[in-house]
Amino acid sequence: MAASSVRARLAEPSGALTVLLTIVGYGAVGGVFLVPEFQALFPELTRDTVDLLAHAIAAVNTVTIATLSLGWYWIRNGEVKRHAAAMTTSFALILVFLGMYLPKVAGGGTKYFVGPDPAYYAYLVMLAVHIVLSVVSVPVVLYALLLGLTHSERELRNELPHARVGRIAASAWLLSLVLGVVTYLLLNHVYDSTFEAAETASEAAAVLLPLVPIA
């Protein structure tokens, strides 16, 4: 009864909220691809605006890589408050990312990679890994964050799986972000691309989900 039941009681609210927020997040991203009524909530964007949002998203993700890395470094050196600040900042940046990503997908268009076969296949592999990690990291990132926000340092160290879940969350999140930035660079700066308007792109997305483009 002792340790395991205490852990279960402490973790239960965070676990339930994690499930709820994960469903909301998946629903919002899925909605901009598959639900016309949800797409209609966002304004139609020009090609220039789509490009601007793509650059801004890549910049936000690059900053998030830095804050996540600092958070990891600080906790390994026992600097708990700095670690907490860095991870909270990282999550806030992801909310900023979503604030740009959702209207970009709903009201913009999609870029498609144009380049030699070896680069194209490498791009597809990196994009696929980026997308898979983005999807699977959502619940573990949320769970680690909620535990950190709602429990004391003693509880996090001794009674809850925060450290273990946090390592998994940070690893998946970091790799996803790095691959996202690399594929952005390949698509927008290293090689050429074609552009498809939002109406046609959303029809294709219904087939490709969850293979969401990041450009």
Image (cartoon, rainbow, N blue to C red):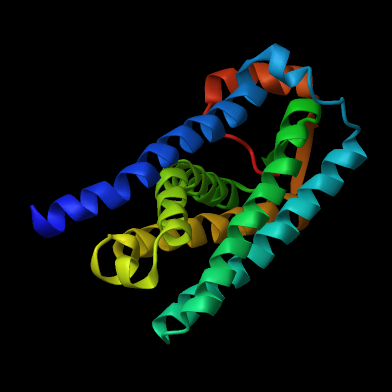
Residue 120 located left or right of residue 154: right
* Residue 60 makes an appearance in the image: yes
Q: Is residue 40 left or right of residue 92?
A: right
In percent of width and height, residue 148 lies at: 44, 61
User: In the picture shown, does residue 58 fall above or below 22?
Assistant: below
- Relative to 43, is 40 above or below? above
Is residue 25 toward the left or the right of residue 8 in the image?
right
Quadrant for the C terminus in the image? top right
* Numbered circles on residues, count: 0
- Which residue is pictured at 61% across the width and 18% down the height? 34
Of 178 and 65, nearer the camera is: 65
Report if residue 211 is visible in the image: no
Q: Residue at x 42, y 62 (%)?
A: 171
Q: Position of residue 145 (x, y in %)?
A: 47, 56
The image position of residue 47, as x and y in percent, is 89, 36
State the residue at coordinates (73%, 52%): 57
Say whether residue 137 is left or right of residue 93.
Answer: left
Residue placed furthest toward the left? 1
* Residue at the far top in the pictured view: 37
Q: Nearer the viewer, residue 195 or 14?
A: 14
Give the percent coordinates (x, y) of residue 31.
62, 22
Residue at x 47%, y 84% (from the top left corner): 79
